[in-house]
Image (cartoon, grey):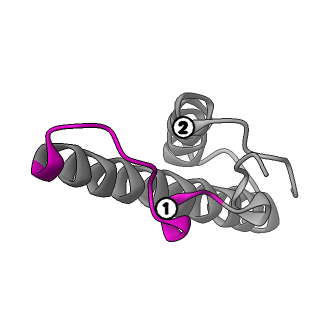
Amino acid sequence: MENQIKDFESAIGELETIVKTLEAGDLSLEQSLELFERGVQLSRFCHARLEDAERRIEVLSQSGKREAAPETLNPSPEDGGAA
């Protein structure tokens, strides 16, 4: 399940679907583990995007104007962000 994560909103939507599917409990152990792994991947992606947004807001709030985000805030291609 190495699907590319497009953006925060699609990741949240997919994560919600995974949670509902796992809660239903109608899957084999292997299927459940695969979905759980994908859920962890999506959760980490979302968490990273939220942290990035928080840092960008802090930069904007401190300076009162928009500045380029430090390089560490730009999502890397392996995190599903644009290069």
* Residue assigned mark 2: 8
Q: Residues within 10 Å of mark 1 (few under 14, many from 20)?
A: some
Q: Give the x, y percent position of residue 48.
A: 47, 61
3D distance between C-alphas at marks 2 and 1: 15 Å
Which x, y percent locates residue 28? Answer: 77, 59
Picture mark count = 2
Amino acid type at circle 1 is Leu
67 or 35: nearer the eye? 67
Using the rendered view, name the quadrant where residue 78 is placed.
bottom right
Residue 69 figure quarter = bottom left
Q: Is residue 9 above or below residue 54?
A: above
Classify mark 1: helix, strand or loop.
helix
Q: Is residue 51 above or below residue 33?
A: above
- For the stretch drawn in magenta, what is the main secondary structure? loop
* Secondary-structure class at tag 2: helix
- The image position of residue 29, as x and y in percent, is 73, 67
Magenta segment boundaries in residue numbering: 62-75
Q: Closer to the camera: disc 2 or disc 1?
A: 1
Disc 2 or 1, which lies upstream in sequence? 2
The residue at 51%/36% (across/down) is 12
Which mark is on residue 42?
Answer: none
Q: Which mark is residue 73?
A: 1
Amino acid at circle 2: Phe
Frontmost residue, 24 versus 19: 19
- Side of 4 relative to 15 (left or right): right
